[in-house]
Amino acid sequence: ILNVEQSPQSLHVQEGDSTNFTCSFPSSNFYALHWYRWETAKSPEALFVMTLNGDEKKKGRISATLNTKEGYSYLYIKGSQPEDSATYLCASHTGTASKLTFGTGTRLQVTL
Amino acid sequence: DAGVIQSPRHEVTEMGQEVTLRCKPISGHDYLFWYRQTMMRGLELLIYFNNNVPIDDSGMPEDRFSAKMPNASFSNLKIQPSEPRDSAVYFCASRSDLAGADNEQFFGPGTRLTVL
């Protein structure tokens, strides 16, 4: 994998459903993997920064896992709420470059 | 800290005019990034600075775009002359490098540019 890829592109779930999405990134020269939450008309807000293989981070109902050897990360949302509706971006930080390479995001819509 | 500050928040201009977007990073952050968000390309990095020095400007679309960081607390992105296809939301972000790879990158509120 040369670029950061996210799937699915969009997701529509009902309130109370649990959901997850995937971020694939280049596994060579891995440095860190960032997850962001981006609400419409706002700026991206950092959720997690993950660096260690096997790492799992949690913030409320949202958690993320990391596999640096195979180059993927999962973001989970338990019991989705309408306020979780946003685009979830992941970004890879590789090698010694200081820039992040962003995926195109997964747009989540949670309805009542 | 007030976070990353960008101005103006909205800019509407006519084709051919010069546009200047401004950014004040979080105090103490070593890195400053300029991004552009469009429907077609998503979030793309234009240029970034480390300690006020431009490191990678490979994302700058063409010579009409330029960016400077004269000091640690200010950067501007200029488009001259502007074209309708430059219409987008421009985000500035900053990050500290004190602890290495696991520092969060903080985004400003963005400037929505419309070129008529």
Image (cartoon, rainbow, N blue to C red):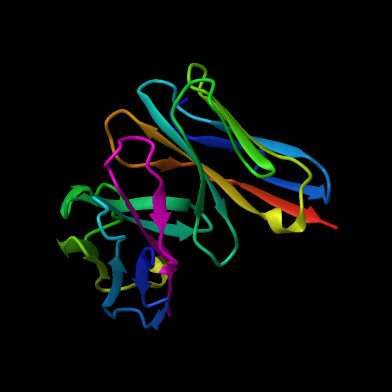
Q: Give residue B7's position: percent from left, percent from top.
A: 35, 75
Is residue B85 or residue B9 the one in the foreground? Answer: B9
Q: Give residue A102's position: percent from left, percent from top.
A: 46, 43
Q: Which residue is drawn at 26% across and 58% down?
A: B62
| Left or right: where B99 falls relative to B73 | right
Residue B91 in magenta stretch: yes
Q: Write down the region rendered in magenta.
A: B87-116
Q: Give residue B34's position: percent from left, percent from top.
A: 33, 57
Q: Give residue A97's position: percent from left, percent from top.
A: 28, 35
Q: Which residue is drawn at 29% across and 79% down?
A: B16
In the rendered image, the vertical position of residue A44 relative to residue B18, given as above or below: above
In the rendered image, the vertical position of residue A94 relative to residue A41, given as above or below: above
Residue sitting at the far top: A69
Is residue A19 or residue B78 the one in the foreground? Answer: A19
Task: Give the quarter of the image for residue A93.
Answer: top left
Q: In which quarter of the image is the C terminus of chain A?
A: bottom right
Is residue A107 or residue B1 the one in the foreground? Answer: B1
Is residue B58 or residue A72 the one in the foreground? Answer: A72
Residue B112 in magenta stretch: yes
Q: Residue at x 49, y 61 (%)?
A: A43
| Left or right: where A99 falls relative to B110 | left
Q: Could you tell me how many numbered marks the image carries?
A: 0
| Left or right: where B4 falls relative to A91 | left
